[in-house]
Image (cartoon, helix red, strand yellow):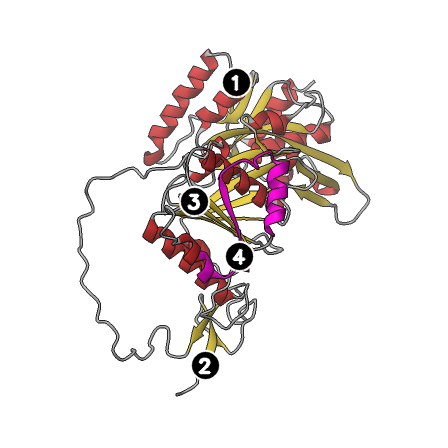
Amino acid sequence: MAKTRTSYVCNQCRTSYNKWAGRCDNCGEWNSLEEQSEGSGIGATPIKGASKGRRIELVPLHGDIVEAPRYKTGISEFDRVAGGGIVPGSALLVGGDPGIGKSTLLLQVAAKLADSGKRVVYISGEEAIAQVRMRAERLKIQNSAVELGAETNLSNIIATLDDPTKPKPALVIIDSIQTMWSDNLDSPPGTVSQVRTSSQTLIRYAKAHNVAVILVGHVTKDGQIAGPRVIEHMVDAVLYFEGERGHQYRILRGVKNRFGATDEIGVFEMTGLGLAEVTNPSELFLGDRDGQTPGAAVFAGMEGTRPLLVEIQALVAETSLATPRRAVVGWDSSRLAMILAVLDAHCGLGLSKHDVYLNVAGGLKIKEPAADMAVAAALISSISQKPLPKGTIIFGEIALSGATRNPSQSAARLKEAEKLGFSQAIIANLHQKKPKNEQKGAKNGQKTAENEQKMGLKVAEVNHLMDLVAKLAANMT
């Protein structure tokens, strides 16, 4: 019998290698090499005696749609990110830095679901039973009917879940997928082939038996889930657990969800009894802010469908260095460079000769360009050493020409600001000309702004960055 030869093929450019490497030399992609045996893949010789397949039934695009049932865990922040609850038969991948609280959160989810009468199985491949029990005692959930297991052999896990003497579990948690291994492969645990095969087997089990499976994944130093990226395509939802060690809050962010909205976040606070839900994250990120501090601006952002108010802090200081320093925490440094260039070119503030430090309070990471006007306002306030008007929120996008553009979901941002006691909002002009497909939304936004103004929130609109500078100069004390 001919010896089977193994090669590693890049799933991006299809370059073949004799051994696995973390980076493809041809296209530069990381973690893209996948193990393949000789005779597999596109263009391979067909196996003798292989099935010819069967015809499947094709149906029209229209038809009755049945809403997927969900398991409510009782942790509303987790259910929000999952799309309203865990869908039976779905596979979720949860990633995060070591020690951030992934196991703590999922053990709390398992306990809540088990207390509601569902059978929950928690398989730990990293910790012993005693260690998981110690965490449960610390969280005061040791009396929950969660079934624990410490195993890394995939065949043993599937055999345990297929026990005919017990009902099928509603939820299975695997902590973590990098520790699982299949005895059908010769490679050690944690390799690309083992992680891919283990994930595929567990996902196939979930779909065949209508059992929800949550996989815990390690992350690399770049913050990406370790292992082949194909795992993120295989699962139904990918959730990232984020946070800084120096802050008490944690953020569960959904980056993929076939059963709900993406970019949704759930906010938790790390306490002595585990992770506690934060029902009003705007108050957490604003904290006990002083409204009379120069260089601080409140930005009304959107995280998924949730409006969120955060404080943006800027410090502009003179420097003797030939190249001024730029330090950014929580925002895109390239975006800051663009705002500084626009302020210098169109407003003549001369920020290019100053050190600039920018920070998003609370450690939150902001990605949307709607924070441009709030960042610009914080920079203007810092260089002039005058605080912004008290009770003011700011949001809007800035173009290279200095023109402003109103972001989407302005109504939700304004409503959240009014709920928290803010009295004024500085936003981009809602009356600016837009493409035909956006005119309807602009009219609705205009009506919403007028309604908010009637309710007590004063809305000031600006067309250009120069207008923002003039507006702030007239109102800053």
Q: Depth-wise, is mark 3 or mark 2 nearer the camera?
A: 3
Q: Earlier in the sequence, mark 3 or mark 1?
A: 3
Q: Amino acid at mark 1?
A: Glu
Horizontal side of 44 relative to 193 (left or right) equals: left
- Tell me, yes or no, if residue 148 can be seen here: yes
Residue 362: image quadrant is top right
Residue 377 picture quarter: top right
| Image label count | 4
Query: Relative to 251, is 204 above or below?
Result: below
**CB atoms of marks 1 and 2 within 8 Å:** no
Residue depth check, mark 3 versus mark 4: number of the one nearer the observer:
4
Q: Position of residue 384 (x, y in %)?
A: 72, 27
**Amino acid type, mark 3:** Leu
- Element type at marker 3? strand
Residue 168: x and y in percent read: 37, 47
Q: Secondary structure at mark 2?
A: loop
Between the C-alphas of marks 3 and 1, the distance is 41 Å
Q: Is residue 330 magenta?
A: no
Secondary element at image label 1: helix
* Residue picked out by circle 2: 5
